Amino acid sequence: MGAATSWGQLLLPSALTSVANSAGGWSLVVFALVWWVRARPRWAAALGLLGFYALHIGYALASAGRGLSWSLAPTNFWVAAGLVAGPLVGVGAAWVRWRTDVLAAVGVAGLSGLLIGEGVYGLTVIGATTSPVYWSASIAMGVAFAAWMVWRRLRGPVAVALTVALTVLTSVALLVAYPVAG
């Protein structure tokens, strides 16, 4: 997926290039893989970290093949972000897999809030220079994931309310953090 991202930036049609320039795609991949292997939280954190770093390695290798360079050092903002986000995404996936309470709500809200917040950012802040196709799909995926988890996985009004509140909070936090991060 990391290699596909690098090549996607070059080869995808303009309506879809944002897929290759978003954190949501990589987060979905890491979340799904950790969930699929049924890792418990401690291992999930490690797998999330390794998953993001593996994506960066694939991206760096494919970029080198294109004549570009990509630093794998933690001083690279996106590598550092992956080192922080990886364990969080991994643990969130484990909580969604194994829990039905407020911890599952936190896991759901992390991913859905990222997808929604990034989509809103894409439409509102960089919408003049990017296609709305992926950003709209990102919002739809975030809303659909949260709704599906509320319907199928979460138990009790507290978990449901927490999912909604934390999804909104995560989305707003991302809208504040992205411009600061540059």
Image (spheres, helix red, strand yellow):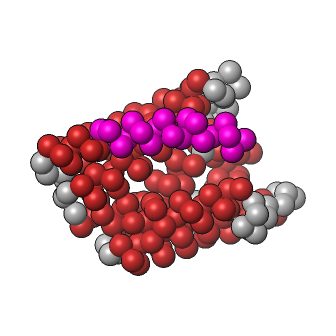
Q: Residue at x 41, y 78 (%)?
A: 43
Q: Please tell me in which quadrant of the rendered image residue 26 appears.
A: bottom right
Q: Is residue 67 above or below residue 21?
A: below
Residue 133 at x, y percent in the picture: 54, 29
Of residue 8 and residue 74, the one placed in the foreground of this image is 74
Q: Residue at x 41, y 72 (%)?
A: 44
Q: Is residue 138 above or below residue 104?
A: above
Q: Residue at x 27, y 57 (%)?
A: 104
- Could you tell me if residue 58 is visible in this image? no
Of residue 148 and residue 73, the one placed in the foreground of this image is 73
Of residue 115 and residue 130, the one placed in the foreground of this image is 115
Q: Please tell me in which quadrant of the rendered image residue 57 appears.
A: bottom right
Residue 11 at x, y percent in the picture: 71, 44
Q: Please tell me in which quadrant of the rendered image residue 122 appears.
A: top right
Q: Is residue 161 above or below residue 62?
A: above
Q: Does the magenta run of residues contain 177?
A: yes
- Could you tell me if residue 7 is visible in this image? yes
- Image quarter where the N terminus lies is bottom right
- In the shown orientation, is residue 69 left or right of residue 86? right
Q: Which residues are magenta?
A: 164-182
